[in-house]
Image (tube, grey):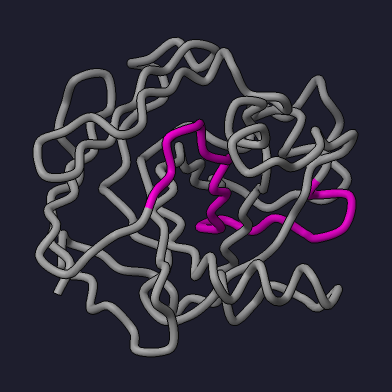
Amino acid sequence: MKIFCIGRNYADHAAELKNPLPSKPIVFMKPPTALLLDNKPFYHPEFSNDIHYELEVVLKIQKNGKQIQPAFASEYYEEIGLGIDFTARDLQDELKQKGHPWEIAKAFDHSAVLSSFFPLSEYDKNNIHFVLKVNDEVRQDGYTKDLIFSFDHLICYVSKYFTLQKGDLIYTGTPAGVGKINIGDRLEAFLEGQKVLDFRIK
């Protein structure tokens, strides 16, 4: 099982981090050890003082495919969930300045929070509404209509370089509103109004 993540896929998020808009999807990966399931608490690591939450719609790949063409992209996913891409922003900024890879800032243990999955047929995939609350305050409020690169585009692009396999995950990018977590915080995520994540920072 592979975890693909897409960076800067919402213009407002790129702007808030003062990053240019990408002309192609920015792809990075996390190992399976990054997953945090079942609303288990996230234990703040000691190696960073600035861990940020990034709420994202997650696609679950339903069959194997490589070099998938646009006409068939929608056949490769039929379930979605919500996930949080935890990012050690202080480490990431340091790595970016040096031109180094992001892995230790993005792919550390339990940095990929994941909800249960739900049938995509229940939603309008081009306008899915998702929300993150931190301590009962709305911090992120996004719609998939604002994606720079659509779900189908991501399927085609990623599969040019990597064989997609059943069970692989694609974290599709985060909207504006990312911010620092603190020990004691409660994070809740909502998919079209339905609460799908509810966990604490310890």
Query: At 59% across and 67% down in the image, what residue appears?
Result: 2
Quarter of the view holding residue 201:
bottom left
Viewer-side residue, 165 vs 200: 200
Q: Residue furthest bottom?
A: 46
Q: Is residue 79 left or right of residue 68?
A: left
Instruction: Specify whether residue 176 is painted magenta.
Output: yes
Residue 39: x and y, percent? 16, 59
Q: Could you say where residue 157 lies in the image, as x and y percent from the top left? A: 83, 42
Q: Say above or below: 54 vs 165.
A: above
State the residue at coordinates (35%, 57%). Answer: 180
**How would you classify the magenta stretch by its main secondary structure?**
loop
Residue at image position (48%, 76%) is 32
Decide if residue 200 is on the left or right side of residue 72. Answer: left
Residue at 66 percent of width and 32 percent of height: 15
- Vertical placement of residue 64 versus 78, above or below: below
What is the x, y in percent for residue 9? Answer: 66, 35
Count the labels in the image: 0
Taking 11 as reference, is 46 above or below it?
below
Front in this rendered view, residue 144 or 72: 144
The residues colored magenta run 158-179
Is the N terminus in the top left, top right, bottom left or bottom right quadrant? bottom right
Q: Nearer the viewer, residue 147 or 90?
A: 90
The quarter in which the C terminus is drawn is bottom left
Q: In screen coordinates, is 9 left or right of 111?
A: right
Left or right of 194 on screen, residue 119:
right
Spot occupied by residue 197 in the image (x, y as percentages of width and height): 19, 46
Instruction: Examine the structure image and report whether residue 47 is included in the region drawn in magenta.
Output: no
Q: Nearer the viewer, residue 66 or 24?
A: 24
